[in-house]
Amino acid sequence: MPTSSHEHHFACHLTWTGASRGPTTSYDAYSRELLVEIEGKPPLVGSSAAVFRGDAKIHNPEDLLVAALSECHCLAYLALAARAGIVVVAYEDRATGTLARIDGKFRFREVTLRPRVSLAAGSSVERAQALHEKAHGECFIANSVNFPVQNQPETLTGS
């Protein structure tokens, strides 16, 4: 069935590689390590978060969700800036998320993005700052989650 221009599909192949270290005989005894493969891209080694007995040195789903929100906002913001003629010379974000027990289940309570945008000299800080709200509204990932994604942007301009 052909895909419409309003529908896009994404796929991955996940393999529990921890099985090579033994089966799930008890909650404490098995490895949480896994491999996520996406066609044409480098593989991603994953595990559960250390607090859930995973390997702290390997990416976990919670980190990846925060990273997806940060990356999505960045890409939406850069596209809007380029279309608006705002010259961004640097962008970084120190995003954080809070996972908490809510209604008896662990859920993300919120994620806070802290984008720091540097503009070329002579650029409008006000116009650039205003684009964050629009970028948030256009972020596919933020539009897909059921918790607040806060934005605390900082915009700097060159002299």
Image (tube, helix red, strand yellow):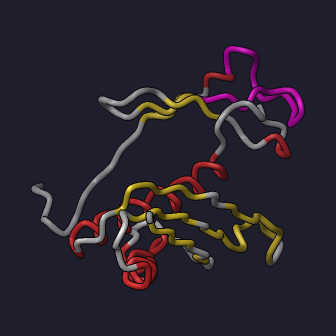
Q: Residue 23 sits in which quadrant? A: top right
Q: Residue furthest front?
A: 159
Q: Residue 84 sits in which quadrant? A: bottom left
Residue 155 appearing in the image: yes
State which region is magenta. Answer: 19-34
> Residue 60: x percent and y percent?
66, 42
Quadrant into which the N terminus falls: bottom left
The answer to whether 149 appears left or right of 91 in the picture is right
Residue 149 appearing in the image: no
Which is more toward the observer, 88 or 139?
A: 88
The answer to whether 126 appears left or right of 15 in the picture is left
Look at the picture and state if 13 lies above or below 159: above
> Residue 133: x percent and y percent?
45, 83
Residue at 25% x, 66% y is 82
Which is more toward the observer, 104 or 158?
A: 158
Q: Residue furthest left?
A: 2
**Per the image, is 24 magenta?**
yes
Residue at 46% x, 27% y is 43
> Residue 134: x percent and y percent?
38, 82
